[in-house]
Image (tube, rainbow, N blue to C red):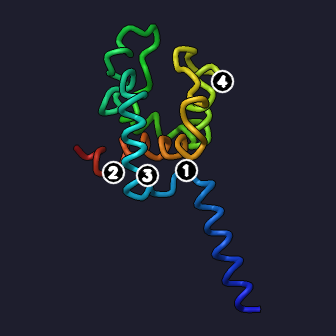
């Protein structure tokens, strides 16, 4: 019995980690998320996530500033995930934010959610 309980707890923790985008990323995942952000997101959101990327300057609605911790604290991980996956219009935001479901799989999108959250980490907020 005890053995089953241990395996059940381990399975639950493993499944929970896979479903929770706020779980800290491993170094390889963080590097992949950084690379994906730099390649696709930074064009509008900027390298520092402040919504000041070169392509974002031409948009009628300024891209989200991920370093605005007050605003970002009100956004759920699910909403950020859905915004990346389905685009801004899918969650009632700007249609200028395109859907990225064709470019990124769900795991990559979860990594991006965690990556954009790091712009508001306590360490960065104190700078």
Asked if labels 2 and 3 touch by Cβ distance under 8 angstroms, the answer is: no
Q: Which residue is mark 3?
A: 29
Name the N-terminal-most of marks 4 and 3. Answer: 3
> Residue at image x 42%, y 36%?
36
Circle 2 crowding by C-alpha within 10 Å: few under 14, some 14–19, many from 20:
few
Q: For this view, does 78 lie left or right of residue 55?
A: right
**Left or right: 26, with 110 as reference point:** left
Q: Residue furthest left?
A: 127
Mark 3 surroundings: few (<14), some (14-19) or many (≥20) residues within 10 A: some
Q: Quadrant of residue 49?
A: top left
Residue 87 screen position, x and y as percent: 59, 24
Kindly give the residue lying farthest to the right in the view shown.
1
- Per the model, the C-alpha gap separating discs 2 and 1 is 18 Å
Q: Which mark is residue 90?
A: 4
- Give the residue number, with chain letter if any, for mark 2: 122
Quadrant of the image occupied by residue 88:
top right
Q: Earlier in the sequence, mark 3 or mark 2?
A: 3
Of the residues under marks 4 and 1, which one precedes in the sequence? 1
The x, y position of residue 115, in whole percent, is 42, 44
Closer to the eye: label 2 or 1: 1
Label 3 secondary element: helix
- Tell me which residue sits at (35%, 12%) in the image: 57
Residue 13 placed where, x, y %? Answer: 62, 69
- The mark closer to the camera, 3 or 2, is 3
Q: Which residue is mark 1?
A: 21
Distance from label 4 to label 1 (Cα)?
A: 19 Å
Residue at 57% in and 46% down: 107
């Amino acid at each position: 019995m005890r053995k089953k309980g241990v395996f059940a707890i381990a399975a639950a923790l493993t499944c929970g980690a896979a479903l929770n985008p706020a779980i800290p990323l491993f170094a390889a995942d963080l590097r992949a998320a950084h690379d994906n952000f730099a390649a696709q997101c930074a064009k509008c959101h900027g390298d520092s996530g402040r919504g000041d990327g070169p392509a974002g300057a031409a948009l009628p609605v300024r891209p989200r500033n991920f370093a605005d911790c007050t605003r970002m604290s009100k956004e759920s991980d699910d909403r950020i995930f859905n915004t990346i996956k389905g685009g801004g219009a899918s969650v009632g935001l700007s249609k200028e934010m395109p859907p990225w479901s064709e470019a990124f799989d769900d795991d990559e999108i979860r990594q991006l959610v965690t990556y954009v959250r790091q712009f508001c980490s306590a360490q960065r907020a104190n700078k």
